[in-house]
Image (spheres, rainbow, N blue to C red):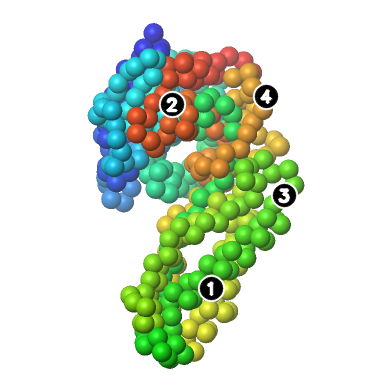
Amino acid sequence: MRLATTRAILGDLIGFPSVSSQSNLAIIHYIAERLETGGAQVEVMLDESGQKANLFATLGAPRSGGLVLSGHSDVVPVSDQDWSNDPFVMREDGGQLYGRGACDMKGFIAACLASLDTLSAAAQTRPIHFAFTHDEEVGCLGAQSLVKLLAARDVRPALCIIGEPTSMQVYDGNKGCCEYTVCFEGLPGHSSAPDKGVNAVEYAVRYINRLFDLRAELVARCPPGSRFDPPETTLNVGALHGGVSHNVIASRAELNWEMRPINAADMQFVKDAIATYVADTLLPEMRAIAPEAGIATETVGEVRGLEPMDDNAARDLVFALTGQNHAGCVAFNTEAGLFQAIGMDAVICGPGSIEQAHKADEFVTLDQLSQCLGMLERLGEPH
């Protein structure tokens, strides 16, 4: 019966086209109504635009030490993807439920909503909270604002399970994700007199070369026994645009790059190193020729990762719930590190495979949903 309820709720959730570029209010209000009907105290937190919202809800008496079940309500776009059916109408075939967000991560949300009776019983021992956020796919914007609110409260949860699609395997670490756009403003001129101009593309290339130097330093900084793959913090240059012609000194260039840090220390190391290089080397050389020259960095998003810890009560709880005894690390980013940053133990475990996420004909299997329901049901048992 609970699996059938989960299937029905998932069909409803998939029916909300909650792409990150659109409002998520409709799906949040649907979730809020189900939680309130199930006896939860619900808060809906609007962002500044009034078009996006986080939801935080609680079963049981509000007190510290509770458990958060966390998921994001937004999904990635379906444009330029060849779907076999309407991506916002759930289709079932051979034990697989198809639709945008089926595994990433509306399947987990549906399982939580279908398990409110069991979770209400578990909440008699400790509070069970639900955190469903907006804009995870575009920089974890909702979770970043939510954790600030939680950190300011006297009553704070202790544990968090993030239900990202892991095929119900346990992960206690994920890399962070930091994305930057850097604009270089130089001085144009004729290419026959390069000393009289400031070539923005050349300075962008030198910036890139410094990033490449930092790659080697990050390998050396990698702690022994790192469980990530690859084990070190990585850097990627995604795009470089600039210049107008062969014989014109480029007056402008734009660079897009990202970092996947394994810990907060590496994130700060890279940021400090590149900022020092810009301030002490690149800008003085540029401005010696053109005082108006500049380098401006836009932080598209900075989300710290989930750092593996020897002591992690959330991981140990999920071990007890699933019978597993090994936790892995993933290179993709989640909201887990944001909860860890405010003092909560966090773990990643949810239904569906990341191999299906973001692709056409995304699906989650009924077996995976059944396993997730089993994990949630066992929360009410003594551990």
- In terms of sequence position, does the residue under pointer 3 or pointer 1 come before the other? 1
Q: Please tell me whether residue 289 is drawn above or below residue 133 in the rendered image.
A: below
Mark 4 and mark 3: Cα distance apart in space: 23 Å
Instruction: Determine which residue is flagged by label 2.
Output: 108
- In terms of sequence position, does the residue under pointer 4 or pointer 1 come before the other? 1
The kind of residue on which mark 4 rests is Asn
Other residues around mark 1 within 10 Å, as few (<14) / some (14–19) / many (≥20): some
In the displayed structure image, the side of residue 192 where residue 327 appears, left or right: right
**Position of residue 90 measured from the top left corner of the image (x, y, whole percent):** 29, 23
Other residues around mark 3 within 10 Å, as few (<14) / some (14–19) / many (≥20): few
Other residues around mark 2 within 10 Å, as few (<14) / some (14–19) / many (≥20): many
**Position of residue 1 measured from the top left corner of the image (x, y, whole percent):** 39, 8
User: What secondary structure is marked by label 1?
Assistant: helix
Instruction: Determine which residue is flagged by label 4.
Output: 325
Mark 4 and mark 1: Cα distance apart in space: 47 Å
250 vs 283, nearest the viewer? 250
- In terms of sequence position, does the residue under pointer 2 or pointer 1 come before the other? 2
- In which quarter of the view is residue 308 placed? top right
Q: Which residue is found at the position 40% from the left and 44% from the top?
A: 137
Callout 3–callout 2 Cβ contact below 8 Å = no
- Tag on residue 223? 3
